[in-house]
Image (cartoon, rainbow, N blue to C red):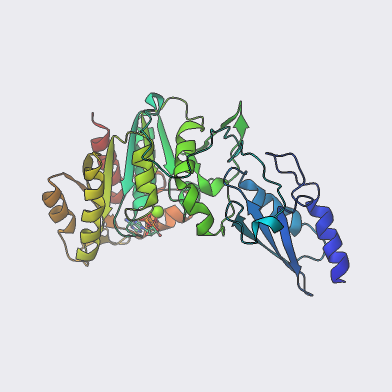
């Protein structure tokens, strides 16, 4: 039984070619370690070089899922540039690199990030990073709503998801498909009047973070350079939490016009946010201000505000940094519900006070 399943799996994999080399990923053993269980679970390893098209992982999974008798597929992506097996044993499917994400006719990125000179992209308008010290404070929520609010106000707005570890912009904006490629440029997807690009469109959801880490600079550069953003007034960049690779890569890749720091009122979030803000200041990116999110609870039934988290954290942080407190956004359950079904609050309930506050923050940021 297993033998014939193996044969069917091989048949499904053979036609898949690596667009970079044109060769079958099965024949070149780029996909390997094909393991099956009696009850139809399949596990394979896919070796991806940084220059390979990451959507290959999705293609492999989909091809295997269609095979008769398969109930579950897991694709483990391994970095081909760090051979797990001794180099001699590895076949040489991946020759010279020419492509990475679908377009990417990139010159090979330097292996050591020797402080690249930031490139200016005049067509992208003002590039604004939305960051925080701590995770889960509402960066992505704030970013999506600010972007949509400015689009509604008539600005040309892009939204780039730089959270390569947990991209959730696709879910929040309600778009998730492979972006089309035209004239060698990735076309961003459109949602709520905003052009959106996320690594989530291109990769397997469960792809291991180790594979993503080394290429974060590359991805950010390619998102800035190889995505057909057209002409924008604002490009919002949703960051992962903290002061890690993504923040550093972004400020090294391009000149960032400003950072918006999101915090919650609690001291611990504020302390982390302060460190996050200082990092931007150190590299010469102005902090435009602080958004205190989940400032207080607002009941959807009564509309009454309730301070349940302590108050003033955002204000203290703003004072300490000598930047404005841009606004205090309530914890309002419909914000979460809207995000979960791809309709941020400025779309799903523009009359709510949360939406109004977010819109006011957006308009304030948009001032020259
Ligand atoms: N003002 C709000 N009212 C109600 N729910 C909110 C509010 N802001 C954010 N949330 C919810 O809190 C959760 C975390 O928000 P979000 O994902 O935006 O945070 P984040 O800082 O981007 O997180 P991460 O660090 O994981 O990227 C989400 O489920 C979101 O819908
Ligand atoms: Mg987020």
Residue 202 drawn at (x, y percent): 57, 46
Q: Does 19 sit above or below residue 137?
A: above
Image coordinates of residue 165 in percent, x first then y, are 46, 55
- Rendered view: 236 above or below 72: above
- Determine the residue positioned at 80% across, 46% down: 15
For the point 36% across and 53% down, which residue is it?
244
Nearer to me, 48 or 109: 109
Q: Is residue 362 above or below residue 367?
A: below
Q: Quadrant of residue 84?
A: bottom right
Could you say which is closer to the camera, residue 184 or residue 298?
184
* Quadrant position of the C terminus in the picture: top left
Work out which quarter of the rendered image holds the N terminus and state it.
Answer: bottom right
Whether residue 226 sits left or right of residue 232 in the image: it is right
The reply to whether residue 195 is visible in this rendering is: no
**Quadrant containing ligand 1:** bottom left
Residue 22: image x %, image y %?
74, 39
Q: Relative to residue 28, is residue 104 drawn left or right?
A: left
- Left or right placement of residue 8 versus residue 124 in this view: right
How many dots with numbers? 0
Is residue 339 at all visible to an observer of this figure?
A: yes
Instruction: Name the side, left or right, on which 331 lies relative to 95.
Output: left
Residue 94 locus on image (x, y percent): 67, 45
Quarter of the view holding residue 181: top right
Residue toward you, 149 or 16: 16
Q: Tell me what residue is drawn at x 59 percent, y 34 percent.
A: 103
């Amino acid at each position: 039984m297993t033998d014939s399943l193996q044969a069917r799996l091989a048949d499904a994999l053979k036609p898949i070619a690596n667009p970079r080399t044109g060769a079958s990923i099965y024949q070149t053993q780029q996909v390997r370690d094909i393991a099956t269980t009696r009850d139809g679970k399949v596990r394979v390893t896919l070796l991806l070089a940084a220059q390979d098209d990451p959507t290959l992982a999705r293609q492999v999974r989909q091809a295997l899922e269609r095979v008769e008798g398969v109930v579950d597929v897991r694709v483990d992506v391994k970095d081909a540039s760090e051979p797990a097996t001794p180099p001699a044993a590895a076949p040489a499917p991946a020759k010279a690199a020419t492509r990475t994400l679908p377009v990417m006719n990139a010159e090979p990125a330097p292996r050591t990030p020797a402080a690249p000179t930031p490139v200016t992209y005049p067509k992208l308008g003002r590039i604004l990073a939305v960051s925080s010290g701590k995770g889960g404070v509402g960066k992505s929520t704030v970013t999506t709503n600010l972007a949509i609010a400015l689009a509604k106000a008539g600005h040309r707005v892009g939204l780039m998801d730089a959270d390569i570890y947990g991209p959730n912009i696709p879910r929040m904006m309600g778009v998730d498909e492979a972006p089309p490629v035209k004239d060698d440029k990735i076309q961003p997807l459109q949602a709520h009047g905003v052009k959106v690009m996320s690594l989530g469109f291109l990769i397997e959801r469960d792809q291991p973070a180790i594979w993503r880490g080394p290429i974060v600079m590359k991805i950010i550069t390619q998102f800035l350079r190889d995505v057909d953003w057209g002409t924008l007034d604002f490009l919002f960049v949703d960051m992962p939490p903290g002061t890690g690779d993504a923040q550093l890569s972004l400020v090294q890749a391009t000149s960032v016009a400003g950072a918006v720091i999101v915090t919650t009122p609690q001291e611990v979030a504020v302390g982390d946010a302060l460190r996050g803000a200082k990092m931007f200041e150190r590299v010469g990116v102005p902090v435009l201000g602080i958004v205190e999110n989940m400032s207080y609870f607002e009941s959807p039934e009564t509309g009454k505000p309730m301070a349940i988290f302590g108050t003033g954290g955002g204000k203290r942080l703003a004072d300490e940094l000598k930047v404005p407190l841009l606004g205090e956004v309530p914890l309002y359950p419909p914000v979460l519900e809207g995000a979960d079904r791809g309709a941020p609050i400025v779309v799903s309930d523009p009359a709510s006070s949360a939406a109004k506050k977010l819109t006011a923050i957006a308009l304030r940021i948009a001032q020259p």
